[in-house]
Amino acid sequence: MKDRVTREVSKFNNELKLQGFKAFQIEKDNTETRTYSRKEFYKICLTTGKSKIHYSEKTYEQEGTILFFGNPHIPYSCETISSSYVGYTILFSENFFKNSERKESLQQSSFFKIGGTPVLKITEEQRSFLNTIFQRMIKEQESGYIYKDELIRDYISLIIHESLKMEPSEIYGQNNNASSRLTSVFLELLERQFPIETIQNPLILRTAQHYAQKLNVHVNYLNRVVKEVTGKPTTTHITERIITEAKALLQHTDWSISEIAYSLGFEYPTYFNNFFKKITGTNPTGFRLAEV
């Protein structure tokens, strides 16, 4: 049973990365919703049930039918509360959506940007209409129609445009223990930067300032909160995670030291060598040889 699930998950992820899009019907325990790379794909969910959605530093409690917009650059997670939780999900990369005449970045959309409206309350009439769109996307992705990608992009645009006409949800974010929540969001965002899978996509967020800008808070506030909750400064968390990734790349890839340095955001290999030796007591080459 476990092997079958693993194979299904692997097939799902391979198809998602290859096609840049996937639509499927969800249930409470659907494993597909938890196994894709969140740092690469946007997400739109039409769900009916009771749940909590943690999005950036806010928490949205919802019951009934909602439309949720997930941005891969903003940490979020969902907690299912009711035993019955059904609906549809679409996942898509920005490159897939913009592979046409569309120029606007999804990150600037009112639904996907920080401070926007990621959750909309849906009426029964709206749910019936949106159900049809999601069902058509699921059917279309399996068809042999040569222009199906363009048609699916039109369906995504239709969902976004229909959402723009709706009233914003009256579900307000709750800052329950704001310090713990912000720290949790920071740690989740940090983890989402990894693993480094290709040299062509190097680590972008490397400093406390980078994370503070992404989370829309002052760096001094982020540092104080993280130190207060975890006992360790923001920079220490970042450094430890980069070192962990560096060791994994040295052990499990044949990338050169220069390539690893670049993939981790270091401008010059010497900077990476000095950084690695300061933390571990040995240089990257010595560590790699010792692990052989």
Image (spheres, rainbow, N blue to C red):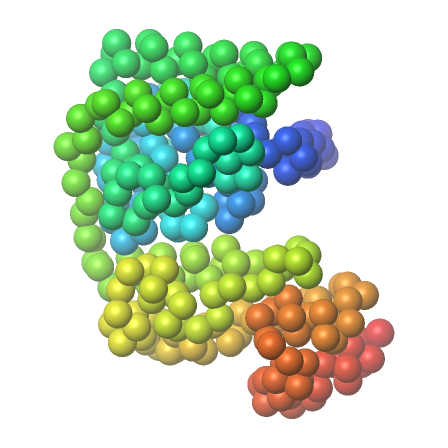
Relative to 288, 158 lies left or right: left
Residue in view at x 53 percent, y 45 percent: 40
The foreground one among 229 and 212 is 212
Quick check: can you spot residue 269?
A: yes
User: Split into 4 quadrants, where in the image is the N terminus?
Assistant: top right
x, y (%) of residue 79?
A: 36, 39
Q: Is residue 215 left or right of residue 103?
A: left
- Circle count: 0
User: What residue lies at 59% left-to-right and 34% top-to-bottom?
Assistant: 20
Residue 237 horizontal/vertical position (percent): 45, 72
Q: Position of residue 216 (x, y in %)?
A: 28, 60
Question: Which of the two residues, 28 or 213, is positioned nearer the viewer here?
Answer: 213
| Quadrant of res 64 | top left
Answer with left or right where residue 291 lies relative to residue 151.
right
Pick the front one: 45 or 73: 73
Q: Which quarter of the image is occupied by the C terminus? A: bottom right
Relative to residue 140, is residue 282 depicted above or below?
Answer: below
Q: Residue at x 53, y 74 (%)?
A: 240
Q: Quadrant of residue 32?
A: top right
User: Is 156 placed above or below 194 here?
Assistant: above
Residue name at image x 57 percent, y 14 percent:
140
Residue 153 spot, x, y in % from top left = 50, 24
Q: In this view, which residue lies farthest toward the front?
A: 101
Residue 35 visible somewhere in the drawing: no
